[in-house]
Image (cartoon, helix red, strand yellow):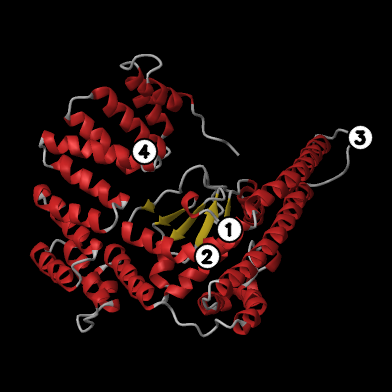
Amino acid sequence: MTISLHRKSLLSIALILTLLMPQTSSFLVKSAQAQNADRPPMGTIRDAEIEQLMRDYAAPIFRVAGINAKATKIILVSDRAFNAFVANGQKIFVNVGAIMEAKSANEMIGVLAHETGHMAGGHLAQLRSEVANAQIYSVIGLLASVGALATTQRSMRGETGGVGIDSRGVMGVMLGPQEMVARSLLAYQRAEEQAADRSAIRYLNATGQSGKGLLETMKRFQNESLFKSSTIDPYLQSHPLPTERIGLMEAAVKASPSYNAPDNPALQARHELARAKLVGFVADTGEISRRYPVSDQSLAARYARAIQAYRFGRLADANSQIDALIAAQPGNAFFHELKGQALLESAKARDSIPYLQKAASLSGNAQPIRVLLGHALIATNDLKHVDEAIRILTSVTQQDDEYAEAFQYLAMAYDRKGNQPMAQLSAAESLFREGQYVEARTQAARAQQQFKKGSPGWLKADDILNYRPQKY
């Protein structure tokens, strides 16, 4: 959404729009462009290695906070800004930039502890209640603004009986209620952010983990915000300023008996691999070389360079480097996954299958790896393999009915088998989960015509046809 208004008006109305369409509570900053929180924001990615690492970070935090880990999803967002936020109470979104920049596992654990504080505190439900009250006040103010505008128009036409007010006064009346509503809601949200910080420290203490990482994250943002601090209006922020947050949490963090507790070495090693993987996949060659020069022979650096070689078409070099990674850690599922992915995307689908099967087995059948395996099986154009792909992908979609890519490959598999109703229904399911509702209804309508009325396929298509996205 783009609002082309005077700068001050844009600020006030953007804040109102952000707060009147909440469903999210962010670790650092909100976008003024509202997202529909019924589905993940655009640019989410799936990666078995990093998803599992985030779940392992969060598991002890969820336990002491009383959060059901099985009902909570951690979703990766393809955004390099350092941020994380919660939506609909049961989803934590983590920007890949946060993982890339967090130097320690403890920093990411602190971020997840903060977001858990929002979930455990029911802040989103409470914020919706605050918004409902604000909406009433805002409507009253806007009605007053419309009345003032009508009076002004009558006055400009020379009509009598109105209040004398010029066009600048009308703008002032229109901004006034919005500004007051925004400030009221932002004050409420700042208090909730402080409560989430306190909860995070409590969870870290209860799990015997240091709060240093959370503190270090705040100090990073304090340094980054120093250059603009003189121009920031603290009453128009959804979060306390970094200086304020540090002041409130530093004493509590340093007083903890776990303040000097070291990071778990195994988690830290996995954290380094996750960072390297993300840099290898999203950074340009210059950044990869700066972060992981050839002189760095750590496993993480070798991982980043192997991905770099694969990404930029140096396939022989990539295969050699990936083979060396597998030799160094034969039980690492994600090195086998990388080998399979590199072969699949080099038009060697049949060769990729053993590596992806091995990766799936070693990872406990992680869904993203099974989806990649399904893709490879379809790409062989062997109908026996296509049957196996349908079995695997159907299992994935039954376990995670929001996995759009799994439905996409399932549509391809059914198409190869000549099963057009199921191919069109699967395509509709994929489009639906990507938020492409018009296109999804088109495919669902085509599929429904070929199913017997009342059958499972007909009912699924009917659900898509009758769905209307919630409007705020």
- Residue that lies at the very extreme toward the top in this rendered image: 453
> Residue 410 appears at what percent x and percent y?
26, 36
Q: Disc 3 residue type?
A: Gly
Label 4 or label 3, whichever lies nearer to me, is 4
Rate crowding at label 1 as few (under 14), some (14 to 19) or many (20 or more) other CA atoms within 10 Å.
few
Q: Disc 1 residue type?
A: Gly
In the rendered structure, are the residues bearing label 2 and label 3 in contact, judged by CB atoms less than 8 Å apart?
Answer: no
- Tag 2 residue: 61
Label 3 or label 1, whichever lies nearer to me, is 1
Name the residue at 51% across, 30% down: 468
| Up/down of 195 relative to 368, above or below | below
Under tag 3, what secondary structure? loop
The answer to which of marks 2 and 4 sits earlier in the sequence is: 2
Mark 2 → mark 4, Cα distance in angstroms: 28 Å
| Up/down of 383 relative to 132, above or below | above
The answer to which of marks 3 and 1 sits earlier in the sequence is: 1
In the rendered structure, are the residues bearing label 2 and label 4 in contact, judged by CB atoms less than 8 Å apart?
Answer: no
- Tag 1 residue: 66
Rate crowding at label 2 as few (under 14), some (14 to 19) or many (20 or more) other CA atoms within 10 Å.
many
In the rendered structure, are the residues bearing label 1 and label 2 in contact, judged by CB atoms less than 8 Å apart?
Answer: no
Residue 191 vs residue 5, the one in the foreground: 191
Tell me which corner region of the image, top left, top right, bottom left or bottom right, holds residue 398: top left
- Tag 3 residue: 161
Mark 4 → mark 3, Cα distance in angstroms: 67 Å
Locate residue 402 relative to residue 63 in the image: left or right. left
Under tag 1, what secondary structure? loop
- Tag 4 residue: 398
Name the residue at 41% across, 67% down: 99
The answer to which of marks 2 and 3 sits earlier in the sequence is: 2
The answer to which of marks 4 and 3 sits earlier in the sequence is: 3
